[in-house]
Image (cartoon, helix red, strand yellow):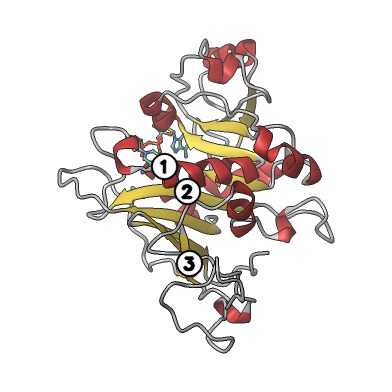
Amino acid sequence: MRRLFPQPAPSGDAATAPACTTDSAAAAAGPAGEPAPPARTVGPSGPPWPLEELADAYAYPAAAGPDAPGGPVPWLRGNMVASLDGAAHHQGRSQPLSSDADMRVFGVLRALADAVVVGAETVRQEGYRPARAREAFAARRAAAGQGPAPAVAVVSAGLDLDFSLPLFTEPLVPTLVLTGAAAPADRQAAARAAGAVVVHAGEGTGVDPARVPGVLARHGHTRLLTEGGPRLLGQFAAAGVLDELCLTVSPRITVGNASRIVAGPGLAVPAEYELISLLEEDGFLFTRYRRAGTAATG
Ligand SMILES: NC(=O)c1ccc[n+]([C@@H]2O[C@H](COP(=O)([O-])OP(=O)(O)OC[C@H]3O[C@@H](n4cnc5c(N)ncnc54)[C@H](OP(=O)(O)O)[C@@H]3O)[C@@H](O)[C@H]2O)c1
């Protein structure tokens, strides 16, 4: 993997020096004057980065952590993969668009999160399982005041979910079911009976996307990751609560009529995001965009 943006800081270490760049201290600068990260541009893509280094590269803003002065403020990050022609899935699954490096980033983003927010259709289509504890991140999570694995928060109105699945019955930390107060009462009871925590974030059957970060924060989850799908992500973006988007651009073309990474009614004015990081491995681009006007990442 190599960093393409911000331009890597020059390194005196020949083993990690860029193969064919003309980096200089003057050229090494991050977005909005932030310090440039260390050089990591060996060869065309270079070997995979150590997980620790990848985790550092994707750290949540300090303001979302427990040590934030005045208390943590929720930060909602999305992680999606899209084909070159904009498809968010191929034949209903995102796996055909992914790669080893993409799955590594996916795993690191999960390992950094307090909670993973996902739409019910993605749970149904992708056969979601509970997030697992990973030894490689145990110390980092403990130091960050996090449990062994992120909670999964499933967003649903109809609650047509199989509550006998391990996602609900066997998680390390209880799975949350985010729904509306008027969602079917028998299905809410079934979720609770399976061990899930039912959380209301709307007065009707559905969830008000704008309320999700605050509601999850009240449950102790401020470092938030949404893995979509497109209909849920579209609502977060439209509600103005998607602080960051980690979009993998997959070097594949699918044609067909698969959804884009966001779906739903168009915005009157496009929301603006600014590039804060760009990594590359094997032709896959790992972009990281921050909503314009939000605080700097840390
Ligand atoms: N490319 C990627 O990175 C990526 C990531 C994730 C998913 N995907 C793909 O995307 C597809 C699924 O995405 P999708 O857009 O169809 O569905 P989705 O966003 O995953 O889920 C939609 C469902 O979420 C629930 N939901 C959404 N908004 C809600 C709200 N405001 N209140 C209450 N419930 C709400 C509803 O569930 P109920 O019907 O239960 O009420 C709705 O049917 C799959 O093919 C998957 O492979 C791709």
Q: Residue furthest left?
A: 256
Q: CA distance from mark 1 to mark 2?
A: 15 Å
Local SS, label 1: helix
Give the residue type that dot 3 points to.
Answer: Thr
Q: Which residue appears at 63% of the width and 77% of the height? A: 34
User: Is residue 283 toward the left or the right of residue 66 in the image?
Assistant: left
Q: Earlier in the sequence, mark 1 or mark 3?
A: 3
Q: CA distance from mark 1 to mark 3?
A: 19 Å
Give the residue type that dot 1 points to.
Answer: Asp
Ligand 1 is within 8 Å of the C-beta of the residue at disc 2: yes
Q: Nearer the viewer, residue 167 or 298?
A: 298
Q: Residue furthest front?
A: 14
User: Is residue 25 toward the left or the right of residue 66 in the image?
Assistant: left
Q: Nearer the viewer, residue 41 or 138?
A: 41
Between marks 1 and 3 in the image, the one whose residue lies nearer the viewer:
3
Ligand 1 is within 8 Å of the C-beta of the residue at disc 1: no
Give the residue type that dot 2 points to.
Answer: Asn
Q: Position of residue 69 (x, y in %)?
A: 84, 61
Discs 1, 2 touching: Cβ within 8 Å = no
Q: Which residue is mark 1?
A: 100
Q: Which residue appears at 51% of the width and 19% of the height? A: 184
Is residue 167 visible in this depiction of the protein?
yes
**Mark number, residue 79:** 2
Between marks 2 and 3 in the image, the one whose residue lies nearer the viewer:
3
Q: Which residue is mark 3?
A: 41
Image quadrant in which the C terminus is located: bottom right
